[in-house]
Image (spheres, rainbow, N blue to C red):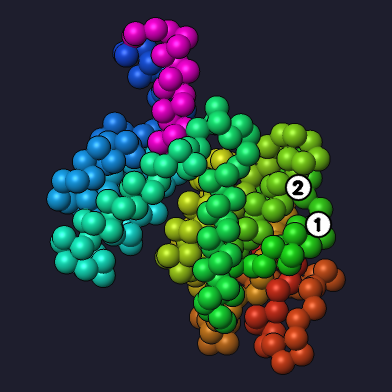
């Protein structure tokens, strides 16, 4: 974020000269806002001063406050000031080294250097994938393997103008695959993405995933789709829906769910014979009761 922001600032300064007030107004039209005290280079300049963890936490909260429409509550469970990093001295040293690593020229991600490559978004997706590979069975709660999500997106055949919903969206990879298909075919972002996720940390992953990939035409709700299907309140009933069966459909078994149940379409993806029905990835069509 800091690299992109600094790149845009330098471009405006080159265009408009030494007019900070004008440049500040132009920066307000960017897709995200980066407060001066929350930028990477501000944190890097103070890296030898005690309190790196606290400063990083404050920077994240400042970024969230400045971009509430896109990042509300995303950083609420993240803390770089945690005792898990050791005592104050050890924690400060670890974070100082982290800041120095990200300051290396090889990690300069300015658009003027990397062009239109989605380096940050792809790196974030790579980290999610590798975290999933070490999480075993739990990974199914937040991550769909790219081969599966790509196949499901192609089976759904999303079209320009579609409003696409995944009621159990995890980290949002399937929704983004559908959006990417439309962009590849038309070169335009004429679609909207809707989703819902029950686990707070996974919901935050999805929000950040969308943000880093530039998917601003989305709305991801936080909550249990089985009990409170919030995505139905933000999208027309005629939209296309995609989904994986919920991994813990206890609300269906107990009769607690008041929302619509998914009905499997013909485009189901094969799963191991022993896998329970509720964990089988499927392409789904939803309908109101």
* Crowd rating for badge 2 (residues with CA inside 10 Å; few <14, some 14–19, many 20+): some
Along the horizontal axis of the image, is 241 left or right of 83? Answer: right
Q: Image quadrant for the C terminus?
A: bottom right
Residue 14 painted magenta? yes
Q: Front-most of 38 and 7?
A: 7
Q: Residue at x 48, y 64 (%)?
A: 202
Mark 2 or mark 1, which is nearer the start of the sequence? 1
- Marks 1 and 2 sit apart, C-alpha to C-alpha, by 8 Å
Q: Residue at x 34, y 9 (%)?
A: 19
Q: Residue furthest right?
A: 266
Residue 212 screen position, x and y as percent = 52, 45
Q: Image quadrant for the N terminus?
A: top left
Q: Which residues are magenta?
A: 1-19
Q: Front-most of 158 and 172?
A: 172
Q: Secondary structure at mark 2?
A: helix
Q: Does 9 sit above or below residue 278?
A: above
Residue 233 painted magenta? no
Residue 152 screen position, x and y as percent = 76, 63
Q: Are marks 1 and 2 in contact (CB under 8 Å)?
A: yes
Q: Does 92 sit above or below residue 100?
A: below
Q: Does 93 sit above or below residue 199?
A: above
Q: Which residue is mark 2?
A: 181
Q: Which residue is mark 1?
A: 154
Q: Residue at x 17, y 51 (%)?
A: 51
Q: Which mark is residue 31?
A: none
The overriding secondary structure of the stretch rendered in magenta is helix
Q: Front-most of 37 and 175?
A: 37
* Crowd rating for badge 1 (residues with CA inside 10 Å; few <14, some 14–19, many 20+): few
């Amino acid at each position: 974020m800091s690299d992109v922001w600094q790149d845009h600032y330098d471009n405006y300064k080159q265009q408009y000269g030494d007019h900070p007030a004008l440049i500040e107004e132009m920066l307000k039209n960017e897709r995200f806002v980066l407060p001066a005290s929350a930028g990477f280079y501000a944190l890097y300049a103070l890296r030898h001063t005690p309190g790196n963890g606290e400063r990083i936490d404050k920077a994240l909260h400042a970024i969230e406050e400045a971009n509430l429409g896109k990042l509300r509550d995303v950083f609420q469970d993240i803390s770089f000031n945690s005792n898990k990093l050791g005592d104050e001295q050890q924690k400060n040293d670890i974070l100082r080294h982290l800041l120095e690593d990200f300051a290396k020229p090889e990690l300069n991600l300015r658009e003027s250097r990397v062009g239109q490559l989605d380096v940050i978004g792809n790196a974030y997706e790579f980290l999610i994938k590798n975290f999933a590979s070490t999480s075993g069975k739990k990974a199914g709660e937040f991550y769909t393997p790219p081969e599966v999500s790509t196949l499901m997106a192609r089976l759904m055949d999303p079209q320009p103008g579609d409003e696409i919903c995944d009621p159990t969206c995890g980290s949002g990879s399937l929704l983004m695959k559908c959006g990417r298909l439309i962009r590849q075919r038309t070169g335009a972002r004429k679609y909207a993405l809707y989703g819902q996720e029950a686990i707070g940390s996974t919901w935050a992953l999805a929000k950040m995933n969308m943000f880093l990939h530039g998917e601003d035409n989305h709305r991801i709700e936080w909550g249990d789709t089985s009990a409170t299907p919030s995505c139905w309140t933000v999208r027309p009933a005629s939209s296309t829906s995609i989904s994986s069966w919920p991994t813990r459909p206890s609300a269906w078994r107990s009769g607690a769910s008041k929302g619509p149940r998914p009905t499997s379409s013909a485009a189901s993806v094969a799963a191991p014979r022993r896998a329970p029905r509720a964990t089988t990835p499927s392409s789904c069509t939803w309908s109101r009761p």
